[in-house]
Structures are given as structure tokens and as C-alpha cells.
Image (cartoon, grey):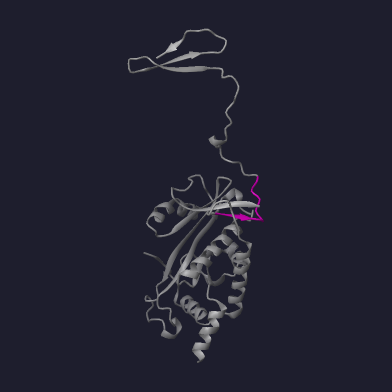
Amino acid sequence: MEELAFTKLTAPPDPSFTCGVESIDRMIRDSYFLCLLKRCYTYQVTARGIVIAYYRIELRRFDNSKFDPPLEEYSLGLYQDLYALHIQYIAVRKDLQKRHIGNAVLEHILRSIDQIVSCCPLRLVTLEAFGELVSWYQQHDFESLGISRENPETEFMFMDFLSDEDRGKLQAMAEG
Amino acid sequence: MQERYDLSREEMEALSERLRNPSREQLRRREEMMQELRKKILPGTRPDTELFEELDLSFLQQPFDYRQVQMSREEPSLHLCLKFNGMGAYQSDVSYPGQDTDMTAA
């Protein structure tokens, strides 16, 4: 049994922290400034007073106006302006990986998103997963849309927070 | 200001199609997973903490905490005594137990 603390960054992150991926370490170092601007929120995860992980969430917009010719209206449906809550990274301290910390952090994130979705009109959660982590995210019910165009070493994944009950109601309205 | 995705046309069409016709099985699986996660939650000692049964990080060394330092009740080996010398300055008298010295440092 372990107690983890999840706190939004209120000071620059631990400069000695590394998850072993330089591009993510760089994002962590830049995250405090972006938190202050409310471009994203980065959370620090601590156990026994030691920083063991960071994760970052932000809102992202699907730019559906850029396509030429435009996307057919039927394929967009009611999602002309589509937003998602994007998990930018979950970074566990390199020397503490493979100890189920990532599982605990992801569970905490999903519980937090579950609460957000209950009071904000948000349906999609997205992330870009490195190849070796795709199956791990799939175990947590994320679906893959294939290789990410922005980061080809990752796969674009999403989770749909629509409830089955609401899906049934929508279907009944469409049929009626 | 939000970041924007750079999805290809095919990806965007595929995503829109999944949103228009979500998989019933997928939605149910996701709801079951969330129910499990809600059941598993164990509040910690503070509002921003949670307990995780499957984690054991007892090997982690706690950083040094001055609040946990125990003050010794033994006789100190050095006595410092501050005195106001009447001229706007403090004097400290330094003496060692068992010694009858008259060292004074301003």
C-alpha cells in the first residue's frame, strides 16, 4: 500500500528528474511556464516526499476547417468544432519504471477525467503512445487510429467517454 | 489558446465515423473499467493524495526533514551566552563545561 500525492505544479519542476526520453524531459522543464499561462496543467506525483512522476493534460482542438476540399458534412456530423482532453505525457522517473507507478498514475488521471466529463461537455480523451506502450493503453480501453502524423514514432489513440445509455438515446432519436 | 491536432483527412474521417457510430461493446467495456476504477479509489491522508494497494515504494529514502530531528537532552559541550553590552551591540560569552575560561567574543 502506498500513498501518492498529485499536485499541480506551483514551482519549477525538479531539475534532476529524468524519465529517459529527452523530448519529454524537455517538455517537463518547460511545463511550469505553460502552467502559469494555463496552456496546460502539469501535475507532480510524489511518494514519501520524492518526485516519482509527472503528467500533463491540455485541451486540444481538431482543425476541421483546414481540409480542401472540405470534409463532407455527413462525416463531421455535429462535430464541426471538436475538442479533446489530451494527455501529453505520463513520465515516470527512469530508475522507478516497471514498478506499476504508470498504472497508478493513469488510473488517477482516468478517475479525474471521469469527474471532469460529468460536469463539462467533453467526450474525447486522446494521447500519442510510443510503440511499446500501445498495448498498455489498449488494456485501459484506448483505441488506436494508427501512426501519428505529428510524431511518427507514436500512435494516435483515443477514448470515447460517451455512455452506452446516451448512445442508445441518440440512436432512438435518429431512428424516430 | 489550445493546441491543434494535425490529423490527415483519412484519420479525421475515421475518427468522425467512430464518433457517429460508436462501438457499443467498446463503450460498455470503458464504463465497466471506470466502475472498477471508482471502486478501487482509496482516499489518502490529504485531499490531493490517494492510496494504491498494488504499490510498494518502501525502498525510497525519505529526504532529510529537520522537523524530525530530536533535540538531545544531554549537557551541551559548548555554552554560548549572549549579553547586551549597553553600547548597542551583543557580546557572546563562550565557555566549555568543566572549564573556567574567560573567553569573550564581541
The answer to which image quadrant residue A110 occupies is bottom right
Q: Position of residue A176 (x, y in %)?
A: 50, 92
| Magenta stretch contains residue B82 | no
Image vertical order of residue A147 relative to residue B56, above or below = below
Front-lying residue, B58 or B16: B58
Taken as a whole, is the magenta stretch helix, strand or loop?
loop
Q: Residue at x 66, y 52 (%)?
A: A1
Q: Nearer the viewer, residue A147 or B98?
A: B98
Segment colored magenta: B49-58
Q: As displayed, is residue A16 above or below residue A98?
A: above
x 49%, y 66%: residue? A116
**Which residue occupies 40% across, 60% down?**
A39
**Does the rendering let one see residue B22?**
no
Rendered position, B103 above or below A5 = above
Residue B44 lies, in percent from the top left, at: 59, 53
Q: Position of residue A160 (x, y in %)?
A: 53, 73
Residue A139 in sight from this viewpoint = yes
Task: List x then y, in percent, for residue A124.
Answer: 49, 71
Total count of labels = 0
Closer to the camera in the image, A158 or B89: B89
Direction bottom: furthest residue? A176
In this rendering, would A68 be left or right of A102? left
